[in-house]
Image (cartoon, rainbow, N blue to C red):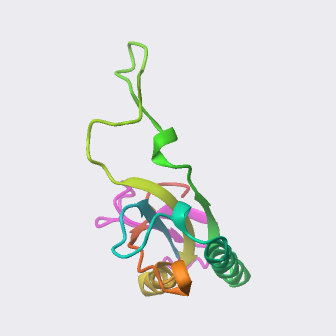
Amino acid sequence: MIEGHDDDDGAGTGAGPCVDRGSGSGEASTVRFMLLMSYEEIPGVPPIEQWDRADIAAHIAFQQRLGQELADRGELVGGEGLAAPQSAKVVRSDGANPPVIQDWPFDDERTHLAGYWTVEVGTEERALQVAGRLSAAPGPRGRPLRQPIEVRAVVGPGA
């Protein structure tokens, strides 16, 4: 059971990663990490819409196998792929007036989230290892994608 999180001063202000304190020892036995994938150009790799069907199928099969392996190990918390950023909306509100909703295209040059995996593992090194496998998912002609994967600890109560 996730009871809290660690931070620099131990005061529970949300600055550190959430930990499993089920052992009662006060030591972190697991930490949750989000592995974030973005819609960004990968040198030498066309957009997935241009891949052969067999390459797409191999890519999806890899993702499913890795997900099952992580689930079998008790490390997979969840994950989802997201729709293309062209279908996204940005909502801004001051809390007093109706929210301002902006459709694509957005004014800024942000990187758009393509999907994420959440894992609960014993060490950051294990999260980095999983991210390395995700980065090497097969792309066109079975070649590893080398997709950048951002690894971030989950923080906050109840996470």
Q: Farthest residue toward the left?
A: 108
Q: Nearer the viewer, residue 88 or 99?
A: 88
Label tally: 0
Residue 29 colored magenta? yes
Residue 64 colored magenta? no
Q: Nearer the viewer, residue 152 or 40?
A: 40
Q: Quadrant of residue 154?
A: bottom left
Compared to 53, does 122 lie above or below? Answer: below
Indicate the position of residue 94 as horizontal and vertical percent values: 34, 21
Left or right side of 68 for 2? left
Left or right side of 63 for 91? left
Q: Is residue 105 visible?
A: yes
Query: Which corner quadrant holds the C terminus?
Result: bottom right
Indicate the position of residue 119 as horizontal and vertical percent values: 56, 72
Indicate the position of residue 86 as horizontal and vertical percent values: 47, 42
Q: Is residue 139 visible?
A: no
Q: Quadrant of residue 62?
A: bottom right
* Residue interval drawn in magenta: 1-30
The secondary structure making up most of the magenta span is loop
